[in-house]
Amino acid sequence: MSKQNNYSYIGIAFIILVFGIIFVPRIIDRITKGDITRQESRSDYAEEKKAVDSKLSDLAFIESFGEKRKVPDFSFTNQHGKTITNKDFEGRVYVVEFFFTTCPTICPRMNVNLVKIQNEFKDFENFGVASFTINPDYDTPEVLKAYADNYGITNPNWHLMTGDKEAIYNLANKGFYIYAGENKDAEGGFEHSGNFALIDKNGFIRSRIEDGNPIVYYRGITSEDEQVNDEGEREQISILKEDIKKLLNE
């Protein structure tokens, strides 16, 4: 081997040595810092997720076909003649009912209970009620306004709504699975459920779990004072109040 070749190998070895001394520690340092950053990022994400999860109450999300059920899009006219959509309730916890103003049976009891709930949460700007009439031909905004005044409905986020009958019935029967329909043989000409649905700030239908399953809806007819209805079922207004508080705190 010639001296020239020896010098070439020595030169290359020297360059590699210099490179190792100068640049390798920098590369290692960057990799280490990068790993720390990624670890910190993963740690931050885990903490944020834990914080979000800890804010959720023990109330169940109601599911259909494996998906959490949300309030369907709707657009109706309230007692003040204003168009109200589901977006007007975003960021609010609210109770849903279907009723009609000339109802001679369960509606008055339902709305007396709702007014008591309204009064309990009068200091919460993010609480509301959505009342949909199932007799929109008669229940005009003016009629709904008089009804609201008569019952002492004062919460600005309590909207009594009227509009297209088919759209309301679809919302009740297909959107919430809360039965509503016309029946000439029923008192008042209509029949409907006396149940309330509870909605969280993100528009999801929620309820408490009893005996391992969500109750889905809350009985709205029996008052706290009555305690038990004619069928021996306990009132659920008190637990509805408790669960509204849970959702307000989420």
Image (cartoon, helix red, strand yellow):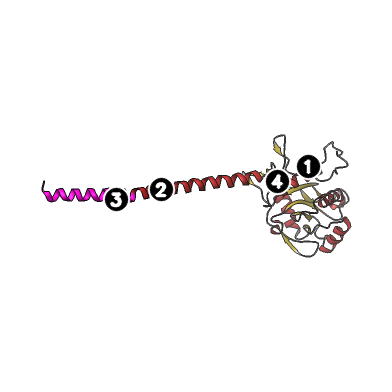
Please name the residue that numbered disc 3 is placed on.
19
How far apart marks 2 and 1 lie (CA) works out to 55 Å
Q: Which residue type carries mark 2?
A: Ile
Mark found first going from the N terminus, 4 or 3: 3
Please name the residue that numbered disc 2 is placed on.
31
Q: Residues within 10 Å of mark 1 (few under 14, many from 20)?
A: some
Q: Residues within 10 Å of mark 2 (few under 14, many from 20)?
A: few
Q: Position of residue 218 (x, y in %)?
A: 77, 44
Label 2 sits on a secondary structure element that is: helix
Mark found first going from the N terminus, 3 or 2: 3
Q: Which residue type carries mark 3?
A: Phe
Q: Main secondary structure of the magenta part?
A: helix
Q: Which residue type carries mark 4?
A: Arg
Nearest to viewer (mark 4 / mark 3): 3
How far apart marks 3 and 2 lie (CA) works out to 17 Å
Q: What residue range appears in magenta?
A: 1-23
Nearest to viewer (mark 4 / mark 2): 2
The reply to whether dot 2 and dot 1 touch (C-beta < 8 Å) is: no
- 64 or 112, nearer to the observer: 112
Please name the residue that numbered disc 1 is placed on.
239
Q: Position of residue 24 (x, y in %)?
A: 34, 48
Please name the residue that numbered disc 4 is placed on.
206
Disc number placed over residue 43 in the picture, else none: none
Q: Position of residue 59 (x, y in %)?
A: 70, 42
